[in-house]
Amino acid sequence: MIDITLLGTSSMLPLPERALSSAFLSCGGHSILFDCGEGTQTAARKAGVSLMKTDIIALTHYHGDHIFGLPGLWQTMHSMGRDEPLYITGPEGLAAALRPLVTLAGALNFEIIPVILPDGGLELETLIKGFKHGSKLTPFKTEHRVSSCGYCFTLSRAGKFMPDKAKALNVPETMFKLLQSGRSIEVDGNIITPEQVLGAPRKGLKFVFSGDTAYCDTLTEAARDADLAVFDATYAEDEQEQTAVEHGHMNFTQAAKAAAEANVKRLWLTHYSQMIKEPCEYLDLAEKIFDNAVCGYDGLSVTLEFEE
């Protein structure tokens, strides 16, 4: 299963009830923070989320409202005794963007390691020992005023384990769990692979975080059949569509259109302009196109679980 919590839903300007852009994903005891705008730490405490053992911070781009929370978070991690490396990924320009932030944070007792994800995504257990088998983080290009990307997190699910086949291959019951988790084993000098004792792969889970973006084909393709999509909805009204396009954002209608085209199960709107005082007053604009749309708010959370 995957736990998702929105931590910041504002754009450009933090408000008393809205921190700047961030979302937190937890899976199997490991976690990813998507963006880290001003107020992320406070929002996390209010939501009951601990950021101290975050494994990866995935940045969508390097505008201040998405990254200015980083030096403070790193200092807090340092003061709490963190000594494990922290991986940071982002679009083109990552090293240059991190340099002044690292300087601001000062000396830290843990290493910050920049990582450029391949276009096809990265199996996270190859980067971080213990990350749940089948977890994959994939970047995709988005359309904003600067180099930007969104992220797709997927958790694959193996087929049903067939103990009769395992026993026929002389696999001890004590080794069943290794095969169930997708790992090959050696028995009497023979390599037994999961494929030999598992049925066809079952439907996994998929989460998509858009970051700042205009409506674009890369977004709808990346979000295809996602269990949850968190989309930029900086502007509310349909009359603001052209403004949204010019600034590399979406309004409620465009976000809903992207969700409908991608056939996602549910949509959370986020990254509201300070002009939007009560996002729910405009929700009907999204619902007329995609009926499972929700106005995101700081602290909104959900657990995504495998289908039976």
Image (cartoon, rainbow, N blue to C red):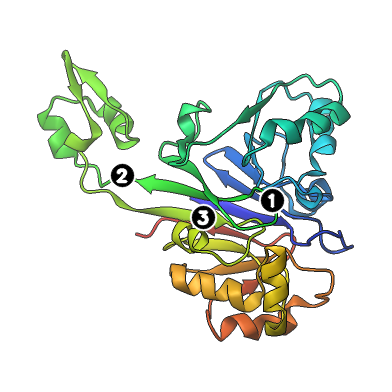
Badge 3 vs badge 1, beta-carbon distance below 8 Å: no
The numbered mark, 3 or 2, whose residue comes first in the sequence reads: 2
Residue type at numbered disc 3:
Phe
Badge 1 vs badge 2, beta-carbon distance below 8 Å: no
Mark 3 residue element? strand
The residue lying toward the viewer, choosing from 92 and 80, is 92
- Residue 260 pos. (x, y %): 48, 74
The numbered mark, 3 or 1, whose residue comes first in the sequence reads: 1
Mark 1 residue element? loop
Residue 158 is marked as 2
The residue lying toward the viewer, choosing from 28 and 206, is 206
116 left or right, relative to 144? left
Establish if 97 lies above or below 266. above
The numbered mark, 1 or 2, whose residue comes first in the sequence reads: 1
1 or 2: mark nearer the eye: 1
Mark 2 residue element? loop
- Residue 36 pos. (x, y %): 75, 46
Q: Residue at x 50, y 33 (%)?
A: 131
Residue underneath mark 3 = 207
The residue lying toward the viewer, choosing from 81 and 6, is 6
Residue type at numbered disc 1:
Val
Q: CA distance from mark 3 to mark 2?
A: 18 Å
Which quadrant of the view contains residue 273? bottom right
Residue 146 is marked as 1
Q: CA distance from mark 1 to mark 2?
A: 39 Å
3 or 1: mark nearer the eye: 1
Establish if 121 lies above or below 233. above
The residue lying toward the viewer, choosing from 29 and 276, is 276
Establish if 213 lies above or below 256. above
125 left or right, relative to 238? left
Q: Residue at x 24, y 34 (%)?
A: 194
